[in-house]
Amino acid sequence: MAKFLKVACIQLTSKQSIQENLKQTIKFVHQAISKKAKLIITPEITNIVSSNKQQLLKEIYLEGNDPFLKTFKTIARENTVWIVLGSIIIRNQNGKIYNRSYVINDHGKLSAKYDKIHLFDATISKKEKYRESSLFLKGKKIKVVKTPWGKIGLSICFDIRFPELYRQLMMKGAQFISIPAAFTVKTGKAHWQSLIVARAIETGCYIFAPAQYGKHNSKRITYGHSLIVSPWGDIIAERKSGQGLIMADIDPNMVNKIRQNIASFKPYLLK
């Protein structure tokens, strides 16, 4: 296992043009690479922000043709970095749509993919309503991926409100957990940071939480506040607003050190 990890989380304001979102994401990924990041994670719905199913079906791609996957496989291979596309919206041959996270290894190959399990159906106000179940097929399988620094568990945004998922990721050996998000402003102000810190404390994992920020279209504004949190629950990097990077140097050995000090973790100490 590699001793230390320099991780970067990217905060974006993705909009409705896949090509423009791709250009913006490439820019920040290259910035992270120039700063020596070896694991780079993007937010939820990196490739497009839209709740119009017909528009999505016209704009999004099959997995084999998706420009985000093609581009970042090449970048990962050429720069020997790992990239987690926090999520992109993708379709299959039957026109079914998924909110899917992809892990690309440093050889430019897919190491894992995860479909969002808990879909966000909520009424925030009279003007702000979400019905992800009318857009996406829900995932069914949890995913933990081996990397040179340890295992990373995958989740997406609304999953954060279901602590049992994170307990399962920990029990499968996760030392790090990605929580890419596009949180609403109202719920973000109320709960985002508290939930992220809670997931870190209850799992003894590092949490990597890149977020969408700002106005995406006339109906969608997101909270931002990307975070990297230690297994003890300390915030070690944060970006409240705007697009850009947060970075941190991660010591994977800290996971076991923290868990050894909390009795409830003793059955799950890494061997």
Image (cartoon, rainbow, N blue to C red):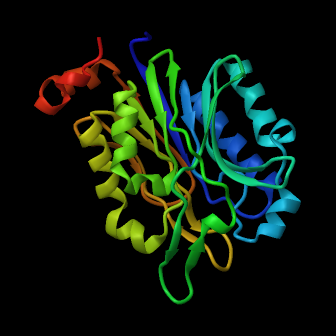
- Residue 172 seen from this side: yes
- Can the viewer see residue 228 in this picture? no
Residue 78: image location, x then y, percent: 74, 19
The quadrant of the picture occupied by the N terminus is: top left
Is 83 left or right of 58, judged from the image as shown? left
User: Is residue 104 placed above or below 154 in the rendered structure?
Assistant: above
Residue name at image x 83 percent, y 69 percent:
54
Considering only vertical position in the picture, is 192 above or below 270? below
Task: State whether residue 156 is above or below residue 247.
Answer: below
Q: Quadrant of residue 132?
A: bottom right
Q: Quadrant of the C terminus?
A: top left
Q: How many marks?
A: 0
Q: Check the image and name the residue furthest to the bottom.
A: 126
Tell me: 54 left or right of 10: right
Q: Tell me where residue 4 sits by quadrant.
A: top left
Picture quarter containing residue 58?
bottom right
Q: Residue at x 68, y 48 (%)?
A: 88
* Image point (35%, 46%), residue name: 164
- In the image, residue 125 lies at what x, y percent? 48, 85
Along the viewing direction, whichever of 216 and 105 lies nearer the viewer = 105
Q: Residue at x 82, y 54 (%)?
A: 60
The answer to whether residue 41 is above or below residue 56 is above
From the top left corner, tell me how far across and down residue 25 is, in percent.
68, 45
In the image, residue 203 lies at what x, y percent?
Answer: 29, 37
71 horizontally vs 44: left or right:
right
